[in-house]
Amino acid sequence: MLLDRLGRPLSDLRLSVTDRCNFRCPYCMPRGAPGSSSFLPRKEILSFEELTLVARVFRELGVRKIRLTGGEPLLRRDLPRLVERLRALDVELALTTNGVLLPRFARELRQAGLDRVTVSLDALDGQVFQAMSDAPGFGPADVLAGIEAAERAGFTVLKINCVVRRGVNDSEVPRLIERFAHTPHVLRFIEYMDVGTQNGWRRSEVLPTAELQRKLEELGELIPLPRERASDVAEEYQFRGARLGFISSVSAPFCGSCSRARVAADGGLFGCLFGPRLVDLKPILRGSADSERELADTIARYWRARADRYSEERSKQRRLPLAWGARAEMSRLGG
Ligand code: SAM
Ligand code: SF4
Ligand code: SF4
């Protein structure tokens, strides 16, 4: 098992397949910000062959779970073909999506061997949805249609991700709970994070889990559920017939068990959502005579040196640590 400097194993990989998106969620890729209109040229994006090789090397180094993400991963052409290739690696394969393209792709993805789907949905009210997701032409009904398509395709238990911003969509929480009560899905509330450099994050917009839970307890009892795996980032509860998860990345960071590596669509390797780009895998993929071995050496060296714990550091300081020069956007790293 490959351990980093803080004793954390490498067990998870987030693989971003595109930096493009059909939404402009202001908390991730705000419209008008440089990263919302200029995207990587096609030749900079890793091909399916390259992504598969990267995934195979991570598998050999201990990764057992790979999540495809973006940008919006369903914008990557022929994504089910990539899923077919990755299925051969014997890892759990998951996808995070904003959901609106699932009616088109859910069945094909399932047939290709995708195991799990996470759908992001921040509001059921149309106006609040637009304030959270800035997605002209799409609305909550499109995401719900995506969720239904995923259910029909055989993804029986979904994770539904809701980023909560105080004063923007916190009023939607009870409606969302009601919508997903008496379904097998897990509705997860995520504290708004200071990822990237463009979202103008302010701590005052974070609704800490403890405060959200206090509000919910006025409506019913939160019954804690056991954690399924040590690496689970959400604390789960049963609440009025719904299964809820809380991801307290700001108020109760979980860096101590963070076992995720992230590879951006252009092959940049990151040890932390908030960290600098450490290594570029693309020159190795495209220039080395023995890419597989060199990738394995590079990734192993990088993981052994890893000591990132940004969120824990943030919680100890009243001010944010200085933004690191090469800090990447969430839309490049995929969450
Ligand atoms: N486009 C896909 C989607 O939205 O599901 C996948 C990529 S998106 C970057 C992955 C996840 O990151 C989403 O669930 C999104 O809500 C979350 N996310 C993005 N920016 C965030 C922020 N500032 N704080 C917390 N979560 C964030
Ligand atoms: Fe796109 Fe997902 Fe970022 Fe929203 S959170 S802008 S859907 S990548
Ligand atoms: Fe992992 Fe970095 Fe998030 Fe901590 S801040 S949990 S190290 S990604």
Image (spheres, rainbow, N blue to C red):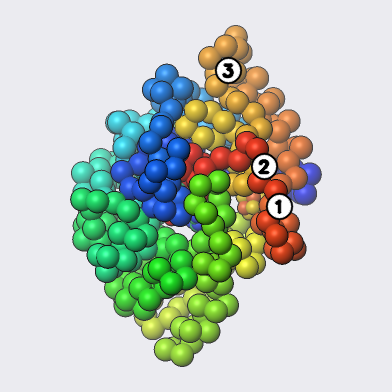
Q: Which mark is residue 321?
A: 1
Dot 3, how many residues are within 10 Å of its Cα: few (below 14), some (14-19), or many (20+)? few
Q: Secondary structure at mark 2?
A: loop
Query: Residue 283: which numbered mark, if any?
Result: 3
Q: Which residue is mark 2?
A: 324
The residue closer to the viewer here, 283 or 48, is 283
Residue 7 left/right relative to 277: right
Q: Nearer the viewer, residue 193 or 61?
A: 193
Q: How far across and how far down the image is residue 18, in percent?
A: 41, 34
**Three-letter amino acid code of the residue under disc 1:** Pro
**Is 279 displayed left or right of 158 in the figure?**
right
Q: Mark 2–mark 1 contact, CB under 8 Å?
A: yes
Q: Hey, what amino acid is under mark 2? A: Trp
How many numbered markers are drawn? 3
Residue in the picture at 42% in, 48% down: 30
Vertical comparison of 163 with 75: above or below: below
Residue positioned 34% across, 34% down in the render: 76
